[in-house]
Amino acid sequence: MLNFFIGFAFFEAGAFFGFFVAALMQEARSGEIGLNGKEDSHG
């Protein structure tokens, strides 16, 4: 039971981290992160 819980926790963490990275890459691709030293479009 503990092994299942640990595996599930790692799966959830991986899914959340993957979603976070995908969102970050999408933001960077659309130019909304100030990588060019300017403010983003949301102020």
Image: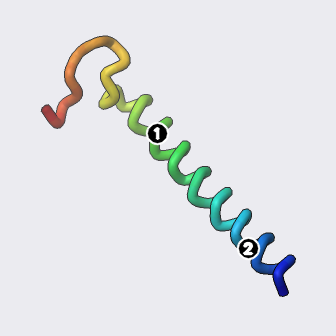
Judged left or right of residue 2, residue 35 is left
Q: CA distance from mark 1 to mark 2?
A: 24 Å
Q: Circle 1 sits in a helix, a strand or a loop, which is it?
A: helix
Residue in view at x 64 percent, y 67 percent: 12
Graded by Cα atoms within 10 Å as few (under 14), some (14 to 19) or many (20 or more), the crowding at tag 1 reads some
- Residue 35 numbered tag: none
Residue in view at x 49 percent, y 36 percent: 25
* Depicted 6 relative to depicted 37: above or below: below
* Depicted 43 relative to depicted 12: above or below: above
Residue in view at x 64 percent, y 60 percent: 13
Foreground mark, 1 or 2? 2
Considering depth in this image, is 16 or 2 the residue closer to the camera?
2
Quarter holding residue 35: top left
Identity of the residue furthest to the left in this view: 43
Colour scheme in use? rainbow
Q: Position of residue 11 (x, y in %)?
A: 72, 65
Identity of the residue furthest to the top in this view: 37
Q: Position of residue 40 (x, y in %)?
A: 23, 28
* Depicted 29 relative to depicted 26: above or below: above
Q: Circle 2 sits in a helix, a strand or a loop, which is it?
A: helix
Judged left or right of residue 23, residue 3 is right
Q: Position of residue 19 (x, y in %)?
A: 54, 53
Quarter holding residue 8: bottom right
Tell me the quarter of the image containing the C terminus.
top left
Residues marked 1 and 2 touching at CB (< 8 Å): no
> In the rendered structure, which amino acid carries the disc numbered 1?
Leu
Q: Which residue is mark 1?
A: 24
> In the rendered structure, which amino acid carries the disc numbered 2?
Phe
Judged left or right of residue 18, residue 23 is left
Q: How many marks?
A: 2
- Residue 8 numbered tag: 2
